[in-house]
Image (cartoon, coloured by chain):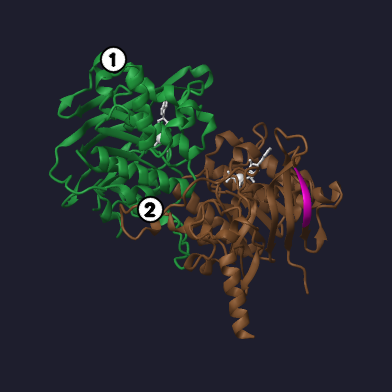
Chain colours: A green, B brown
Amino acid sequence: MSQGYQNAEPLLKLEGLAKSFKVGTGFLGSRKRFLKAVDGVDLAVLTGEVLGLVGESGCGKSTLGRLALRLLRPSAGRVFFEGADITDLGRRQLQALRRQMQIVFQDPMTSLNPRLTVGSLLGEPFAIHGKYGRAETGRQVAALLEEVGLRPEHARRYPHQFSGGQRQRIGIARALALRPSLVVADEPVSALDVSIQAQVLNLLMELKERFSLTYLFVAHDLSVVLHLSDRVAVMYLGKIVELAPAAAYTGQGQHPYTQALLAAAPVADPKRRFRPPAIEGDVASPLAPPPGCRFHPRCPERQDICGQQEPPLREVEPGRLCACHFR
Amino acid sequence: MAHPLLRIDDLVTAFPREAAEPGGPPLVAAVDGLDLTVGAGQVVGLVGESGCGKSLTALSVLGLVPPPGKVARGSIAFNGEELLTAPAARLRQLRGAEISMIFQEPMTSLNPVFTVGRQVAEAVQAHLAVSAREAWARAEEMLAKVGIPEPARRARAYPHELSGGLRQRVMIAMALALTPRLVMADEPTTALDVTIQAQILGLMRRLQEESGAAFLLISHNLAVVAQMAERVAVMYTGRLVEEAEVGQLFAEPLHPYARGLLACLPARAEKRGQRLPTIPGTVPAPDALPPGCAFSDRCPQRFPRCQEAEPALVEVAPGRKVRCFLHHDRARTRQGLAA
Ligand SMILES: Nc1ncnc2c1ncn2[C@@H]1O[C@H](COP(=O)(O)OP(=O)(O)OP(=O)(O)O)[C@@H](O)[C@H]1O
Ligand SMILES: Nc1ncnc2c1ncn2[C@@H]1O[C@H](COP(=O)(O)OP(=O)(O)OP(=O)(O)O)[C@@H](O)[C@H]1O
Ligand SMILES: [Mg+2]
Ligand SMILES: [Mg+2]
């Protein structure tokens, strides 16, 4: 969390961003259909802030994170980084940009090459960007390891020789190697035990202050996102349905889906006993999203208009956006 | 005195050491001297971090410890009947009918090539002398009971045709089809989204109240346990470190591990963005425990004795057990003062 991001320029700006995947259905993928994983997202991440992104499995959080870093090419819309349009950049130009924008994944085991030592893994970004000679790279790797709470001698070990929490530290060190300004953290603590989760969250917050980072922090656990974000965006089936300062969610969400999410999250307090779920049914398939408001089939407040017209994301209070006909 | 429904005493479940040194101990205890009681109709939560032995505890009760692992010591009594020495046929009879289990990932415990209706019906027929038609009817009835929309149609679906939440409902239908007296639910909602988790927890709560079955709810999620359980047992490296009524545990955890675990939850932080309290270090591997108390190497309150001997699980107040010298001494002082 940080102060002073208000009035800041957007470091990252997404305009009408969309991504469709071609998917085969039926036998042998004969019928090609399009799955809209992200469908018209406008979002600005301000310099120095932590923007949290929450939503249930498959709503498009990871796709949005990858689009923002241009690890994926959008089907529509534009991506701006530091004011420059990076939507159509080619490989070369993107590679240069990669120094400034990095990603931390949920499961570092699948994102770290198991055959490389941690020293080589962390040295790789320097090599790719031709930054240092061998000796200097070694010194930088040792420094990186210390920054994330590991020891320089760990450089000789392989990823499988570390615990899950330590591997996540390695993933973070790798993302920070080139001193980026923007880090997309995609469920960085979801695979970790609570005691280790707290260690890694603290580390992420410390590093953010030390290196003046901006985070797009993706997670499905509301308590984690609310704890360290300045603002939080709630996503449902490829769309942002609410965007507000994190503190605004402690009272109640505005959007009925946000309210359902908040009500569904169990609280570690037996005095506040579990209430029956606020919403029924499953998330609809992104292959066949409901017409109108995508949440309407599960919404306790739905009216006729909800199945017919899609509500725009608009300001309902100063600084608070919500996409609902009745807010 | 009547027997508790489930009583586990000094359970040790162990695996052969991977690279046993000559002369060294041949087994590693993954569950190590566990005592746990579940009363009839009670909901007991079993919590602890990954690898602490929660699943193995449940598998030991069912006689399903994966080889080469085995129960090396202890006693597991179900309604007074010793399970560890019971013949295999008797265990099969109890499994499903009297004691059933719900696993984390229903996809791995449902058979992908049969319809879900058939799988529930077969579970019924395995224990009751009913016709196929009656078993199918019972299956549909159970699918309806667990809130599956259009149960007659869904009964003909294959597991992969259902969402994760619906599959978990099928598992619950199967687990409760024979009105067991004990249901062990191992991370029943961990693979689910939070709104679906809330539905499943609500369903389990309702069915538990209706059927009067006892639940052993295994979870690493303290919030889930806080919402569901009456009593909570906290495990660390194969042992119970604290057991208490749920309100007591969450209001005032006594064991330093339990206290650390609760303190590091972001939702319990005093202020947003504040540095979270942490437990230093990581959980040691079962074959690399520190001497004395297994938590001593990470404990902020350790003193020399903690690394000399392992504290026992002691009842420090009625219904409250703690495995920690700090509280043993206090309990003794209190008793001394009272005497
Ligand atoms: N490469 C791909 N090809 C086809 N479909 C994809 C692809 N990547 C993602 N999808 C689909 O797009 C939707 C959004 O996926 P995404 O991974 O962005 O969701 P998410 O919110 O990150 O979910 P989770 O919480 O499970 O990580 C899902 O329905 C997913 O199946
Ligand atoms: N087949 C096996 N061979 C060797 N060791 C095993 C085996 N299965 C489990 N163990 C060990 O037993 C210990 C307890 O495992 P268990 O699965 O009961 O943990 P758990 O508390 O259920 O963890 P989780 O929260 O990750 O499910 C672990 O440390 C694990 O290494
Ligand atoms: Mg994702
Ligand atoms: Mg387990």
Instruction: State the extent of the magenta-drawn residues as a range.
Output: B70-75
Task: Classify the position of ligand 4 by quadrant: top left, top right, bottom left or bottom right.
Answer: top right
| Location of residue A48 with respect to B95 vertically, above or below | above
- Quadrant of the drawing holding the C terminus of chain B: bottom right
Q: Which mark is residue B276?
A: 2
Tell which of A145 and A67 is nearer to you.
A145
Tell which of B237 and A253 is nearer to you.
B237
Q: Position of residue B185 (x, y in %)?
A: 62, 52
Q: Can the viewer see residue A3 in this picture?
A: yes
Within the magenta stretch, is there residue B244?
no
Q: Is residue B69 left or right of residue A27?
A: right
Q: Secondary structure at mark 1?
A: helix
Which residue shows up at 29% across the image and 15% down it?
Answer: A130
Q: Position of residue B190 (x, y in %)?
A: 53, 46
Tell which of B46 and A164 is nearer to you.
A164
Q: Quadrant of residue B110?
A: top right
What kind of residue is marked 1?
Answer: Arg
- Quadrant of the drawing holding the N terminus of chain B: bottom right
Numbered disc in front, either 2 or 1: 2
What kind of residue is marked 2?
Answer: Leu
Which residue shows up at 26% across the image and 55% down it?
Answer: A248
Chain at tag 2 = B
Residue that carries the numbered disc 1 in the rendered image:
A91
Q: Quadrant of residue A138?
A: top left
Chain at tag 1 = A
Q: Label 2 vs label 1: CA separation?
A: 40 Å
